[in-house]
Image (cartoon, rainbow, N blue to C red):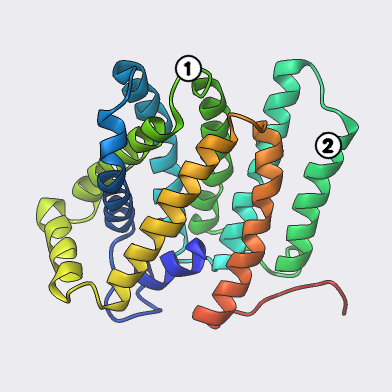
Amino acid sequence: MNFPVTKLVTDSSTTALTIPPGTFVAIRFGLAGFAFSPFLLRSSSLPLTLSAGFEVGLYLALGYVSQAVGLATEGAGEAGFLCSLQVVFVTLVGAWRKGGVTFKEGLAASLAVAGVGVLEGIGGGGVSLGPGFWLLMLQPFCFGLSYLRIEEYMKSTDSLSFTASQLAFTALFAGMYSVGAEGGWGGLAESVGGIMGDGWTSPQALAVAYTAVFGTIISIALETEALKHVSPRETSVILTTEPLIAGLGGAWLLHEQFQGKLWD
């Protein structure tokens, strides 16, 4: 549901009161990072945890900010499909690193992407090659790279403290984008004040809270812990289920057309 909820509050065509994309990502991850900050302070290897969080946080910030900006012109389902291409990127990198890919891995990646494409109606006018498309195409590279690096760092870091570091640096980098490209410190402060001014009861505040808790804290914490036990390729295949949820959520929240092409 992250895709439709993000579009709901960052696309001016869906609501009268929007939050700039970078600002939304900064607030979302800032809240999540604040909630997880005690785990960071308890890290047994703080320098490594901070340097790892800095690197992965940069990839996540690029991915999530480009996602939020791209959703201004593309639908939630289309954004979800493009994000699912991370399975191709991760599989190719994995094949390069170990000198090949197994038949099972290649088949799983191909079926996952093809299935998402069928459900989203890709090839039937589902995706336009505008600026939003190219921004959303950063997702598979940024998120795929983050999975690969998380797997490496999890060999020597604690999952909870590493998650806290990722969240904090993602918020920092998104905040830098917000200040530099979306109205400076005044614009960021105005957005935060607008959310808090309604006592966290406005649709925008609820969207920020939902994405901070379910789409950020829980998902990234589970993802980080999972990558200690499951390969990035397997993780990326599992995450190709997200576009289906994005398409259904877009149809429900935004009244987008769910372009399934299972039959004519």
Residue at image point 79% right, 58% down: 115
> What residue does disc 1 label?
156
Tell me if residue 241 comes above or below residue 63 in the rendering.
below
User: Tag 1 or tag 2, which sits nearer the N-term?
Assistant: 2
- In the rendered image, residue 191, in percent from the top left (x then y), is placed at 18, 64
Q: Residue furthest left?
A: 186
Relative to 189, 115 lies left or right: right
Q: Quadrant of the C terminus?
A: bottom right
Quarter location, residue 121: bottom right
Residue type, label 1: Ser
Q: Nearer the viewer, residue 51 or 75?
A: 51
Relative to 57, 260 lies left or right: right
Q: Nearer the viewer, residue 181 or 168?
A: 168
Comparing labels 2 and 1, the label whose residue is closer to the camera: 1
Residue type, label 2: Gly
Relative to 226, 169 lies left or right: left
The secondary structure type at the circle numbered 1 is: loop
Residue at image point 53% right, 19% down: 155
- In the rendered image, residue 139, in percent from the top left (x then y), is placed at 53, 46
> What residue does disc 2 label?
106
Residue at image point 51% right, 36% down: 224
The secondary structure type at the circle numbered 2 is: helix
Count of numbered tags:
2
- Can I make out residue 30 in this image? yes
Tell me if residue 229 comes above or below residue 121 in the rendering.
above
